[in-house]
Image (tube, grey):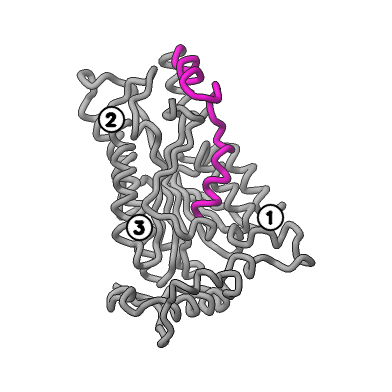
């Protein structure tokens, strides 16, 4: 499947210039997005980069425009639409607030009967302070039909979907030999199946509206290590599966302008982590001692990560795994 991404005219002009200097051999019949001219890239051109209209200095705003609304335009999400699963509270909601501040319209999807009170505060701020909107949709990410219908409805409103943060997840503390089949099914169906359902539902809408997009899968450093103080073999392996899913989807959709990356946070103070501490009070001291900063993260500390990954600032990043863990795995 091939298509021409929906982009603003200036961006299309810049991309056309880039295409004009790209060898024809790089454009296969199945992925050709832009026409090329007879111009070919010369290695010598790299020495004249500062004279290119696409050089980074040419993208900087004029001095008279350097006030807050015009700084770092690649982070500007004005007019874009995003969905966040697990956005009813905690990490997902914090990320949603970052996108709103950058100008986006955000839909938070969660299985909570009603969102956390923090969501209502964020919704009010979105409308009053930023002239944007934050909406809540109740879905169960395990239900693929429900997920696809929700994403289709979101995208249909503005005929676009610019990105997804798949942050829905659960944990279950239990040793492997004591793990029930029901608990196994519950954790995997939400942490892996739900992420797969959400990512594919988002991509379907991007293909439908012939649009580029960015998808961020929230995995965990638990997908890379076994955490001291937390016996959770299924949770850990479900997050490892999410990391590999991110790489696979990035490979599959990259030539169509859809980027997919994974985020591996360290221990964050969230309702899910509070439940771990309730069952194992000693875990907090262990976790704090195990990273280089000597503390746990706050959800708000991943706002910048969300904005970077969902915006044009990360336009050349796909198939990557961002490990942000306070140095936990760097010892």
Q: What span is colored magenta in the figure?
A: 282-310
Give the label, 3 or 2, closer to the camera: 2
Q: Is residue 300 magenta?
A: yes
Crowding at mark 3 (Cα within 10 Å: few <14, some 14-19, many 20+): many
Q: Is residue 208 left or right of residue 12?
A: left
Marks 3 and 2, Cα distance to the nearest angstrom? 25 Å
Give the label, 2 or 1, closer to the camera: 2
Q: Residue at x 49, y 67 (%)?
A: 157
Secondary structure state at the residue bearing disc 3: helix
Say which mark, if any, is on residue 201. 3
Magenta-drawn stretch, dominant element (helix, strand or loop): helix
Rendered view: 41 above or below 279:
below
On the rendered image, what quadrant is the N terminus found in? Answer: bottom left
Marks 1 and 3, Cα distance to the nearest angstrom? 28 Å
Crowding at mark 2 (Cα within 10 Å: few <14, some 14-19, many 20+): many
Q: Seen from this angle, which residue lies furthest right?
A: 64
Crowding at mark 1 (Cα within 10 Å: few <14, some 14-19, many 20+): some
Q: Residue at x 40, y 50 (%)?
A: 261
Say which mark, if any, is on residue 174. none
Q: Residue at x 46, y 40 (%)?
A: 113
Residue position for label 2: 234
Q: Residue 111, can we see it?
A: no
Q: Residue at x 51, y 30 (%)?
A: 326
Residue position for label 1: 130
On the rendered image, what quadrant is the C terminus found in? Answer: top left
Q: Position of residue 209 (x, y in %)?
A: 41, 71
Residue 20 sits in quarter? bottom left
Marks 2 and 1, Cα distance to the nearest angstrom? 40 Å
Q: Residue 273, can we see it?
A: yes
The foreground one among 204 and 6 is: 6
Q: Seen from this angle, which residue lies furthest bottom?
A: 38
Q: Is residue 252 magenta?
A: no
């Amino acid at each position: 499947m091939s298509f021409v991404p929906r982009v603003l005219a200036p961006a299309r002009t810049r991309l056309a210039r880039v295409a004009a200097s790209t060898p024809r051999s790089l454009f296969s019949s199945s992925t050709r997005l832009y026409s090329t001219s007879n111009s070919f890239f010369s290695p010598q051109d790299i020495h004249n980069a500062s004279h290119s209209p696409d050089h980074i200095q040419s993208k900087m705003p004029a001095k008279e425009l350097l006030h807050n609304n015009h700084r770092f335009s690649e982070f500007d999400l004005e007019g874009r639409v995003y969905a966040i699963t697990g956005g009813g509270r905690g990490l997902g909601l914090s990320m949603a607030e970052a996108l709103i501040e950058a100008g986006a319209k955000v839909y938070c999807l969660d299985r909570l009967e009603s969102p956390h009170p923090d969501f209502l505060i964020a919704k009010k701020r979105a409308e009053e302070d930023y002239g944007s909107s934050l909406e809540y949709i109740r879905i169960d990410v395990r239900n693929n039909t429900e997920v696809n219908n929700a994403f289709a409805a979101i995208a249909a409103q503005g005929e676009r979907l610019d990105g997804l943060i798949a942050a829905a997840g659960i944990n279950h503390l239990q040793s492997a030999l004591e793990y029930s089949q029901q608990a196994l099914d519950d954790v995997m169906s939400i942490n892996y199946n739900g992420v797969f359902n959400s990512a594919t539902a988002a991509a379907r809408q991007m293909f439908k509206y012939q649009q580029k997009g960015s998808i961020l899968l929230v995995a965990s450093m638990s997908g890379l290590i076994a955490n001291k103080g937390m016996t959770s073999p299924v949770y850990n392996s479900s997050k490892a599966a999410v990391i590999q899913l991110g790489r696979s989807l990035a490979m599959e959709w990259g030539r169509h302008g859809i980027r997919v990356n994974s985020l591996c946070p360290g221990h964050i103070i969230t309702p899910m982590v509070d439940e771990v501490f309730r069952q194992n009070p000693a875990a907090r001291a262990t976790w704090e001692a195990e990273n280089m900063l000597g503390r746990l993260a706050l959800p708000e500390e991943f706002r910048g990560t969300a904005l970077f990954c969902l915006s044009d600032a990360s336009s050349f990043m796909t198939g990557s795994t961002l490990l942000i863990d306070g140095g936990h795995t760097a010892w």
